[in-house]
Image: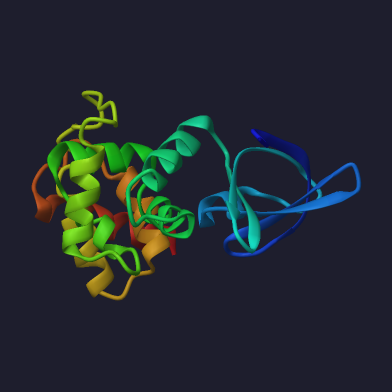
Amino acid sequence: MISTISGTVRHKDLHVVVVDVNGVGYKIFCTTDTALDALPGESILLWTYLSVRENALDLFGFLDKETLDTFELLIGISGIGPKTALGILNVASPSMLRQAVATEDTSYLTKVSGIGRKNAEKIVLELKDKLVTTSADIDKSMKGAGDVMEALLSLGYDERDVREVIKKIPKEAESAAERVKAALKLLSQHG
């Protein structure tokens, strides 16, 4: 029904942006990364999904079509609603999700509120045939990213910072210890 929205960012919150389109402000639920990229007063184009429920019409927005497609795959799984799917995309990018599904690593998914080990395994099983994985998704450098995330979170680092740093870990760091060490170095430079 509403495929994209293009307009000016009027307001943003941690998980919401309000986009003004010709004087009408659309409240759009989004990932934290999308909200952080949205700058008030700047123009933005979001790929959208309209969730129609008995008592609400909710718009969900994404910076790219790939993330929207992944979101739609997630909500197609029994028991996964739009808010939960958005929560999953908050902790794992489409690329990380494809990699997690390809290697059957459920650690990213269990970080989402309301998703336990069994639900995470169900998501991996349901998406196995639906997500097209590339060799880059199964890259050894991404393997074990869940362990690195868990180690850094247990040390008290902010989850958002950890996710950003994991994306920047050099490919040469193969063992979990090397990856944690590289992440700690990046985190020390970050803050």
Asked if residue 33 can be seen in this view, the reply is yes
In the shown orientation, is residue 22 left or right of residue 98? right
| Along the line of sight, the residue nearer the viewer: 77 or 98 | 77
**x%, y% of residue 164?**
39, 52
In the shown orientation, is residue 15 left or right of residue 71? right
Q: Would you place residue 76 above or below residue 153 in this image?
A: above
Identify the image quadrant of residue 172.
top left
Q: Would you place residue 52 above or below residue 97 in this image?
A: below
| Along the line of sight, the residue nearer the viewer: 115 or 92 | 115
Q: Would you place residue 109 above or below residue 62 in this image?
A: below
Residue sitting at 22 percent across and 66 percent down?
A: 116
Rendered image coloring scheme? rainbow
Residue sitting at 67 percent across and 34 percent down?
A: 4
Identify the image quadrant of residue 148.
bottom left
Asked if residue 181 can be seen in this view, the reply is no
Residue sitting at 57 percent across and 61 percent down?
A: 15
Q: Quadrant of the N terminus?
A: top right
**x%, y% of residue 156?**
30, 75
Residue sitting at 28 percent across and 26 percent down?
A: 132
**x%, y% of residue 162?**
34, 59
Q: Would you place residue 180 above or below residue 4 in this image?
A: below
In the shown orientation, is residue 38 left or right of residue 10? left
